[in-house]
Every structure is written in C-alpha cells, then in structure tokens.
Image (cartoon, grey):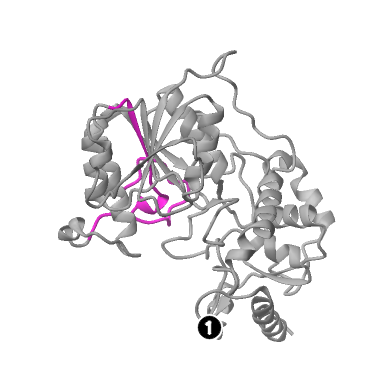
Amino acid sequence: MAGDAMALWDRRDFLKTTAAVAGGLGLGAACVPPDDSESGPSPMSILILGGTGFIGPHMVEYAIDRGHEITLFNRGRTNTHLFPDVEKLVGDRADDLTALEGRTWDAVIDNSGFIPRHVRASAALLADSGRYAFVSSISAYKDLATPGITEDYEVARLEDPAMEDADEWDGSTYGPFKALCEEAVQEVFGDRANIVRPGYIVGPRDSTDRWTYWPVRVAAGGAMAVPGTPSDPVQFIDARDLAQWVVRMMENGTGGVFNGVGPVEAVEMSPMLEACREVTGSDAAFHWIDDFSFVQEQGAFFPIWAPPEGTFSAVHVVSNAAAVAAGYTSRPIADTIRDTLAWWNDEALADRPDGMRAGLRTTDMERGPATMEAMQEAEQALLEAWNARNG
C-alpha cells in the first residue's frame, strides 16, 4: 500500500473491505444459467473448428452433455485421443478444407481462426450453415487504454494493408488480424454471426501459465511480491464459462459482438489473491509494490497484472454488460482456483520439466520457462531492493 512499503494486506482488512461484494469474489454460490426449457435445449449439429486445444475440449464436453451432435475439424495433431466417439474431419485451414465441402451444420464454432484469409475461406464454404461463432480477442481493439471499452470501440487496423494476406501473425498483427477475421465472418453470416472477444482465458488446460502463476505461487507460501495496489482491478474468464456461454448462445440463436471478460462482478487483485490463500491454506504474505517506476527500474514483469499507464492500462476494466445481458455467467473464483491447481498438480507439471512458461520474470533471469525456486529467488531480491529503497 502507498503509505507502507512492506505492509501486509491483512485478512481482517480483506474481510472488512470486501464483505459487501462477497459474491463477486467467487467464494459464494455460482451463477447458474437457467435451462431453456424443462426438457433442455433442442439437439443441434455443431461443427467446431479446432476442438482439441484449450477452449475446445470444454465446449465439446458441455455440448455433448446438452445432447448435441459434434463434429471436429482440425489437423489431427493435438490431443488426438480425446473424444473417440465424436466425428473427426481432418484438414488444414491454410490449404485443405475438402472435408467440409458439401456439408452444413446448425452451428459452427471457430476457436482456431487467426489468419483472415483462412477464416474468410471457412466462412464462405460454410455459408449455408445456421450460425457462425468466432472466438476473437479484446486485442482486436485499437488499444486498451480507455476504461469501460464497449463493443463499438474502434478496432485495430494494419499499418500495411498488404499484410492481410500473410500466413503468419506476430505481436503487431495479432489484434488487427482478429478484427479482420471478425469482419470476414460478419460479411458472410450477417446477423447469424456471433463474435466473442475474450480477455485473459484461464483455468484447467491453459498452456500459457499466465494466470495459473498466481494460485501456484500463493500455494508455495512465504513472502510474496505483488505489483500495484490491493484495489487494482483484474479481469479473466474461466475457459469453461466461456465455452458453455458460447454453446448456449448457439442454442438461443444469439448474434452480435460481445466482450468475453469476467467474472460477472468486478474483482480486485487483493480479493483474488486472498481467495487463492483461502483455497490453498498457505501462509503467503502479500507485499505490495505500488510504485510502477520501481518495477520498471528493476526490470521486473508480472503476468496478468496491468501497469497504470500505457496502451494496456485499461485491459482489466473492459465492459461485460452486453455479455451478461446475453447470458454470460461466471462460477465462483474459488472453483477456478481449486480446479486449476488440481489440473496443474495432476497433469501440467509433467509437461513442464523446465518450469512455468509464465510468472515473475526479471531481466537478470534467463529467457524461457522458470522454476518456482528461480522465480522466488528473483522475487526476494526484488523485495529486498524495495525494502532498502523505502528504508
């Protein structure tokens, strides 16, 4: 906190200041979407472009539970063991859509569209299908520096329009490419198009380790460096909530553009971390480094957290009003934390022999994955420098 360089955000302070919004912490009852009818939704045929990575499996599982008939289209390279009873079409969005020719589905869900010409080709080929949902990103906006961005905010554009035909994307083209992909879907499907712009997608199966770092680090316990202040906002969406919401919108025939950010109730960094501590039962002590210039001077970087200035300063205060009105609901944060940690310990660790793919990093650390021990070592050096600067 600003007036106390090494002050701990005490549990009693947390309980006093957040009791009024306890539901928003995700420590209470989940927001459960109502059934469309007593008998459930009408069965649909749904094509998922992708379906075996991060979001896709959650969609497939939920859609099957809802009684829908699923078809997957992908290159057949990732998690091929999943869903042995589901129809699988093999092809490549770059140059081989043959398996999709002459077929239609009640709904198409596109989780794997990054290149505009690929999405344009799939949308055109599937134009006679019922609906087309495209999972985009809030990176499609021209910037994320304006608090409360709604779906009509200006989107990003390529500096060089000729780059639209490129077969690869990078950090400078990712957002503009997503915006062009959206437009390709809308041009073909019109009001049958559904565009979802998620922020940070988190939970089990997340290969980036970005949000996962926080519950894993809290579970490790001890003195813990946290950038910013306890009241800094944080937004993320559980992949399962995103998946289920998209499927329900297909069932309900919901079209339009929606920011896929959550949870439903606004959350701050302190309540999120306190929830991690409650779930894990750890002795983590949060030390807030509230001077961004110091973080910069130390060459430190923390995942998910956004600095108070720059083009990404409002990444955690994007409006989700339209999404909530369209049926988006969020499970308790405690459930996301608990399930993410279970997945991390049971599955992800075996795939991370060199450490986490994201987390606290400093310029003194080697690039690439880092072990928790290496991150904690850098963290303690950071805290010592912070304490020394503040006497």
Q: Is residue 287 above or below residue 341?
A: below
Q: Main secondary structure of the magenta part?
A: loop
Callout 1: 10 Å neighbours few (<14), some, many (20+)? Answer: few
Q: Which residues are magenta?
A: 129-158
Residue positioned 48% across, 55% down in the render:
315
Give the residue displayed 21% in from the left and 36% down from the top.
124
Q: Position of residue 225 (x, y in %)?
A: 68, 72
Please state which amino acid type lies under the numbered disc 1.
Answer: Glu
Does 20 sit above or below residue 102?
below
Residue beneath disc 1: 366
Left/right placement of residue 56 relative to residue 334 reads left
The residue sitting at the top extreme is: 38
Image quarter hosting the N terminus: bottom right
Q: Is residue 296 magenta?
A: no
Q: Nearer the viewer, residue 164 or 96?
A: 96
- Residue 321 coordinates in the image, percent (x, y): 50, 36
- Can you give x and y, in whole percent of width and height, for residue 367 in the image? 50, 79
